[in-house]
Image (tube, coloured by chain):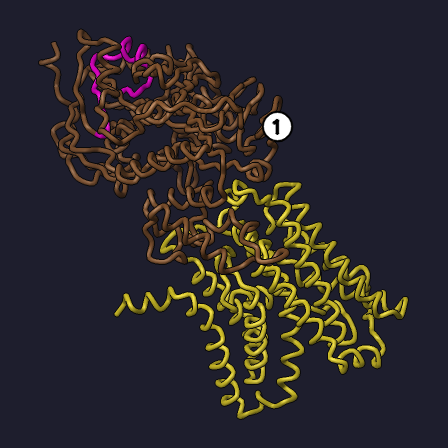
Amino acid sequence: MKEKLNRIVENRWFNRLLTPAILVLVALFFTVATGGRFATPRNLQLMIDQALIVATVATGAVFIFATGNVNISMGAATALIATIAAKAYVATESIPLMFVIAIVAGAIVLAITALLSTALHVRVLYITVVMMTLLSSLQKGILGSSTVSLPYAVYSGMKNAGLPYIIFIAFFILCLVMFHFTSFGRKLRYIGINDTCAELTGFKKSRYLFWGFVVAGVGVGLGAILTIIRAGSISTDTASSLNMDCMLAIVLGGMSAFGGSRSYTWSAILGAVLVTVLNTGLQMMGVSSTIIQAIRGIIFIVLLVMSQKRPNGLPSRDG
Amino acid sequence: MAANKEVLLEVHDMVKNFGVTVALNHVDFVVKRGEIRGLIGENGSGKSTVSSIISGMQKPTSGTMTYKGQPWAPASTLEAQGKGICMIVQEAGTIQGIPVADNIFLGHEKMFMRGPVVNHGKMVKEAQSLLDKLGIDIDASERTERLSMQQCKLVEIAKGMYWDPEIFIVDETTTALSQSGRTLLYRLMHELRDNGKAVLFISHDLEELIEQCDAVTVLRDGKIIGSLDKEEFDPDVMKKMMVGREIKGGYYRSDYDGYSDEVVLKADCITTRHDLMCFDLELHKGEILGIGGLSECGMHTVGKALFGAEKILDGQVTVGPGKTVVKDPETAIRNSIGYTSKDRDRESVGLSGSIHENIASTGYIVNRLFGPIISFRKEKKYVAKEIRDLSLKCASPYHTVNTLSGGNKQKVVFGKWIGADSQILILDCPTRGIDIGVKAAMYQLIYKFKKEGRSILLISEELQELIGMSDRILIMKDGKVVYETKRADNPTENDLIEHMI
């Protein structure tokens, strides 16, 4: 019996189908618990808008997490890029330029993170701790005490044209292909499995880390655009919980928190939807936002423990 | 004289297995008061294993020990230390970043507790007086990372001596010591013996053993081969006892086929940060070139340097007829070089990855469908072929490598490089920790590679393996090739050991 259970758990498909199953159950639960309010078209639309942002940034972040590294500055980076892009639009009134600036700036900010880590031989996590503070104070510096807003016609026009969907789907398909159908994703995963061995198999860690971060940077840039389209204005509160949402999404989506073998781009979508459903559902049930934060923290820790198979010892990628 | 010595420690019928590897095979031996007993044997013969069990570092699989007439089963090195058995280990046994005094009293900080705080001043003072008493010129308040390797070893010796040991185990320590350090250690060892204590001395240096020991016990493949008293000491007899095992027929290759004159891999006066100084080497097409020596002779660095995984400060490694310079593993692999590290689990294979992921990692280019897109079908075939050809035992290619045995893990590594069709294979201890059956398969495989015209650099700590497989053998010592011999000359182990030690 136990052996049978083990075999099911170890099956590749078990992991892939677990999250969708949980998602359906959680959504059903909230629908019942809120007396149907959860499933109203308006609420679903709101959740989709929010989930798209998380999914976009998280999809890019998969390219970092796969290598066994953690970036905690993605939220701060998104807020900064959104501020810069919005300011750029206000100054030039050119939508294409806003796009270009957001994508390029996003790629540059994350590329710098990767370069700092490899040049200084400091682990990515520590660099991103610094980057998180740095980027967010930079954003506050640029923004001051004001907010920057786009004209209603502009952002609602983009929204009504379905631009968020187009942006996300295009980016996701690109990432899906790169990650699962080319050597790039396999190399990133192999670095996550054992970076020394990857290096001795000819995969230069510094180079692939750099390009992984660039992809994540493009995700951050597009996430910033989606943030602008959704809200129309940027303040210092923008994207404040985005980073935690992304990290939670990646592990909730069935990916290992330590990267390596169990790294999938689709974790980002599944996880993003699940995180948004949880956030919104709990809110609608009247749970206070501080308690929601605590619940998210607990879920994250539990998933972290679950993603390391080793029975004892500190978290490790060798599990 | 030997008869009236009191028995201090008795090891009885001890067995230690590491997985399928038998490190100790029913070992019995006795340590008596007032003697310095040498333990000798090849790498992996079980010397360090038996001494680490005595000193409480690990537990035996079965067997018993008696110490001072009482059953002896230490739970930790601290317990052993307290009861008078101290061991100086082969590897670094000091922790960097803390003062010398803290290293000496590591785990015994309680002795200096005053209420909840450690009286560090008192600890330093006590450590200093110990160092002074032993005649070791080190400041006890100095931070350990500022010390040289020799000084670190001396700190360890002091740490052991503080406990006034009844049995002092010195495991391969002298290689880290210069003449002055050795003289000091010898003096301490003799003092202990003269005071009726016992010393267990492990060394590869026969001369040293003959000079310092009162008796030696010889181990081979986890078994006691015999013991010699001082009067019976003879380097030739000792060497023969250490290595003289019989070769089973068909285990190694038996032919005398030659190899081509074409040089495929060449090291031209390469200097690395450690170990190598203007080192030259030529590997020919179809050649099995063996490199042997003691573990720290620099041969492992040679393998890494030839693969571009070790920073080369001067000189260069070139590969192929085009003389491409190998600067990093990437260039090496592009030029059809494969490398298996001695430290397999850390450097050659991704343990948490699946067999599929590991083997496929060298085939991303050949398994493409079009452009950069990888064909899943081709990849699956690529992996399946290696699993079949190497008769790798696994339930599914999607199982993780850490579920496999050592031999099958090594097959995964081999599969990576054979799949990549590497023409030059640098194999660093390819049969380390592998049981006999898989070993024989590995040797057949290596011979098959040779017949296919591939070139193999076989770096090994096992002389039998080198003699049995190589077309040419280089023996290294202190980063230099000190001896070269050809298969046609039928070298013996004694010839090689002569130059190693």
B221 inside magenta stretch: yes
The x, y position of residue B51, in whole percent, is 26, 28
> Residue at point 44% right, 13% down?
B482
> Residue at point 23% right, 31% down?
B54
What span is in magenta?
Answer: B201-222
Q: Quadrant of the N terminus of chain A?
A: bottom left
Tell me the colour chain B is drawn in: brown
The x, y position of residue A183, in whole percent, is 58, 54
- Chain hosting mark 1: B
Near-viewer residue (B13 or A289): B13
> Residue at point 37% right, 21% down?
B173
What residue did someone put label 1 on? B323
Which element type, helix, strand or loop, lies under badge 1?
loop
- The part of the image, by quadrant, that contains residue B474 is top left
The x, y position of residue B181, in whole percent, is 41, 14
What amino acid does circle 1 point to? Lys
> Residue at point 60% right, 37% down?
B331
Chain whose colour in the figure is yellow: A
Near-viewer residue (A88 or B239): B239
Near-viewer residue (B491 or A193): B491
Of all residues, the one furthest to the right in this rendering is A92
